[in-house]
Amino acid sequence: MSSEFGKALRVSIWGESHGPSIGVDVQGFPAGSRIDLDKLNAFMERRAPGRNSLTSKRKESDSPEFQSGLEGNTLTGEILSAVIYNSDQRSSDYESLADTPRPSHADYTARLKYGDSVDLRGGGHFSGRLTAPLCIAGGIAKQLLEDRGINVGAHLMSVGTAIDESFPLYPSKDLFDDLAAKELPVINEDAMITMKEEILSASETQDSVGGIVECCVTSFPGGYGDPMFDGLENLLAGVLFGIPGVKGVSFGSGFSAAYQRGSEHNDPFCIKDGRIATETNNSGGIQGGISNGMPILVQVAFKPTASIGLPQKTVSLSRMEETEISINGRHDACIAVRAVPVVEAAVSCVLLDVLLGG
C-alpha cells in the first residue's frame, strides 16, 4: 500500500485502525530545529476521539512515542519515527461485517485490490484513525512554518446546511489560535449553535452529516510551485484527497468562479505596505500553479460518515445475494469536526516540503 508523499520532506504513514499501533516516518526535517512537545500534544488532542459529546466515543490518548529523529525536543536530522499505541479497539463491532461490505466504505474495493486477507477491522489502513500519525508530521511541520513567520489555521466552514462566515482577506494568528481552542472551530458563534443542532440531529436518528473545512495560510512567500502538473494546487490537492472522507478540494472562490464574470472574479493588483498584493483573493493565493504572496485559501469537502446505524442495503460476498446491515460501533456523526487539524497538518506538510525543496 502506498501511503507516502513529499520530496524534500518524505512522509510515510503505516498501521491499521485496530492493530497494536499506528505511526509515521518522516525524512527531511531539518536538523537542529526545536519542537515544543506540549504544543504538539495540544495539536494532537484537537483530532483525538472522545474530545467532546459531538465526536466518537472511542478513547485514545494519541500521544506519540518517538523512536528516532528527536533528541529531547530537538530534531536530529535522522528519520523521525513516531508510534501511537492503540488502546481502545473494539474489533467485535466489525465481526459481522466480514462478509457484508459497508456501503460507501473501502471494504469492497480493498478486497478487490488486496484479497480477503486484508485487515478491515475499524476500516484497517483505510480508516480515519490513520490521520493521527499524519497530525504528528503536520503538527511539527506547522511549528517549523511558524518559525519562518508562516501561520496555518482552519475552521468549519459548514456542517450540513449550517454555514460559518469565510476567513477575512488577512486572518491573524490570534484568530487561528482562538479557533483552535473552541469545541467547534467557527468564526461566527451563531454558526456553532446551528452546527451542533445539525450534528446532534443526525446522531439521534443514527444518521450522519457532511461538512466543509476551510484552511488559510498567511505570509507564505510568492514564487513557489510550478505550472501544470507540479503546481502548488496539484500538490496540496493530492495530499488532501488522501484524507479519508474527502470528496472535493477547491481554492479561493472555488466552484463559485464558474458562475462569475471575469470582471467579478479577477483579483486587481495593488500596492500594500510597500509590496505588490491583490485587492481580492479569488485565486486563493495561487496563480498558474505558483504562489503569489497572498494568503493561500483552500476548502475541503467531507462526505457524511459512511458508518451509520440506519439499515442499509448491501450484499453477502459468500452467498452472492443481497442483504441488509445496520452498523454498530463508535463513529463520528460528522467527520469534518475532527478533520480541521488534519487539514492543517496536510497543508503544513506540503508547504514545508515545497519550501525545503526550493
Image (cartoon, grey):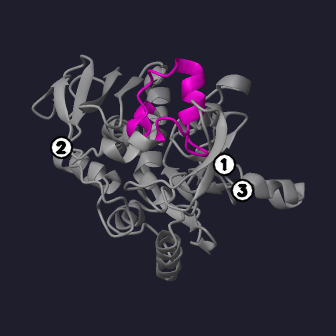
Which residue bears the numbered disc 1? Answer: 251
* Mark 1, other Cα within 10 Å: few <14 / some 14–19 / many ≥20: many
Name the element at disc 3: loop
Which residue bears the numbered disc 3? Answer: 253
* Mark 2, other Cα within 10 Å: few <14 / some 14–19 / many ≥20: some
Cα separation, mark 1 vs mark 2, equals 32 Å
- Front-most of residues 58 and 139: 58
Q: Earlier in the sequence, mark 1 or mark 2?
A: 2
Q: Is residue 192 above or below residue 286?
A: below
Q: Is residue 12 visible?
A: yes
Name the element at disc 1: strand
Q: Residue 21: x, y in percent?
A: 25, 32
**Is residue 58 found left or right of 252 in the rendered image?**
left
Query: Which residue occupies 46% across, 39% down?
Result: 346
- Front-most of residues 33 and 256: 256
Mark sitting on residue 314: none
